[in-house]
Amino acid sequence: MKNGKRMAAALLLLTVLLVTVLVAGDQFQDVPLKQNTGGSYPDAQEDLIVVGFSQLGSESVWRTTHTDSIREALSKENGFFLQYDNARQKQENQIKAVRGFISQRVDYIVLSPLMEDGWETVLTEAKEAGIPVILVDRKISGADSLYTTFIGSDMEAEGRKAGEWLVQYQKKRGKEDEPLNIVMLTGTPGSSSQLGRSRGFYEVAAEHPNWKFIDLASGDFTVIKGREVMGEFLRRHRKIDVVVSQNDEMTFGALEAIQNAGRMTGLPGSMIVISFDGMKEALELVADGRINCVVECNPRQGDVVARVIKRLEAGEPVGKVYYVREQVFTRENARDHLAGYEAKEAE
Ligand code: GZL
């Protein structure tokens, strides 16, 4: 094998090993990075890695947990100077923030893109300025060359997990061929979480012609819109068998609307509710039998962001994609997982 090919193979092997270790080892637990145990902290700016972080908003507890995870990991103690911008759910604010980071010549840009489209121009400007871009949480539709690494969830896999859970749930009850009227509360239109979860769920649904999608609308990942949309669905449709809600906050709003309409959820014979994210409050509702299934979407991505940047600083290879490991919460495992929260709170 020629030297060049041998080197390429070694690099590929190293990258694969790297991804495995990161995904297998971390699961984004709150494992603090190696604290600066040396003498003085890097006290001058030039010693710190300057990172511009454009966060899309603060629309959900998932989002604020995600933000906290990145701010904690990219701390001064860990060798970073973080400039944070909250775009309040407006892509134009994110584009403005990224341009600001470019003009300030930050070392890295971390971006959670509100929606997939519309990033070519500004990320080309970042590339031309020689500033690596790390995508977190959501993806972009543009060329892979516009960013160095993506760290987040496999949203299509999340959608498939939701569909596969429903197949098994119906099978266990001997109802796999029963017609199901399904309504879907989607997240922010055009976001990779909305697109991926929808695609993944539809992929499973395509194998079940007895599943009928009778309504769909965006609840924009918020409690208020989730309540409004579900209220509208209940007014329009007498028979709803399944509610698929693309994040816990919309699910909480939907449950309020369902309760206000005097209807039940979760128990056999009542509406089946499937949600995404895995907030503690949602797991409590799973344990109480009001939500049937929550597909986890892990917001704790800060540690991996910090490790990837440190590797880039050291000139080491990094993977193109780091998917966080996620599970599905049901009545069978929710209480065990909640016990983990309680144990942590007792520490
Ligand atoms: C998922 C993330 C979504 C969460 C919502 O990665 O983009 O945005 O599921 C959040 O809670 O608003």
Image (tube, rainbow, N blue to C red):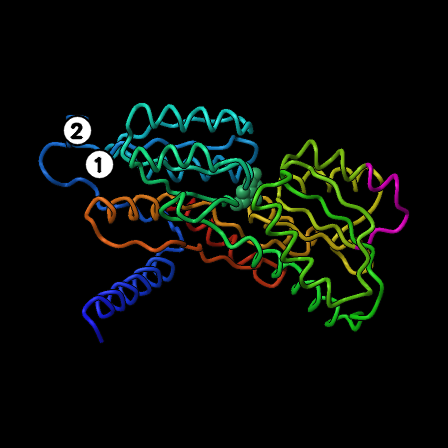
From where the camera sits, is residue 240 visible?
yes
Question: CB of residue at label 2: within 8 Å of ligand 1?
Answer: no
Q: Residues within 10 Å of mark 2 (few under 14, many from 20)?
A: few
Which residue was labeled with disc 1? 79
Residue furthest to the right in view is 238
Residue 225 x/y as whole percent: 70, 33
Please tell me whether residue 154 is drawn above or below residue 133 in the rendered image. below
Mark 2 or mark 1, earlier in chain: 2
Q: Is residue 93 above or below residue 239?
A: above
| Displayed-image quarter of ligand 1 | top right
Residue type (three-letter) at the residue carrying disc 2: Glu
Which residue: 77% across, 70% down?
173
Residue 233 forms part of the magenta stretch: yes
Occupied quadrant, residue 328: bottom right
The residue located at (65%, 56%) in the rendering is 293
The answer to whether 110 appears left or right of 75 in the picture is: right
Residue furthest to the bottom in view is 1
Mark 1 crowdedness (10 Å alpha carbons): few <14, some 14-19, many ≥20: many
Quarter of the N terminus within the rendering: bottom left
Do labels 2 and 1 touch, CB within 8 Å? Answer: no
* Residue 15 percent across, percent down from the top left: 30, 61
- In front: label 2 or label 1: 2
Give the residue type that dot 1 points to: Gly
Q: Regarding mark 1 in the picture, which secondary structure is present there?
A: loop
> Which contiguous range is marked in magenta?
232-241
Q: What is the spatial separation of the Cα atoms under label 2 and label 1, in whole angstroms?
A: 10 Å
Label ID, residue 46 = 2
* Nearer to the camera, 275 or 341: 275
Q: Residue at x 21, y 44 (%)?
A: 313
Q: Is mark 1 within 8 Å of ligand 1?
A: no
Work out whether residue 287 can be spotted: no
Location of residue 183 with respect to 87 vertically, above or below: below
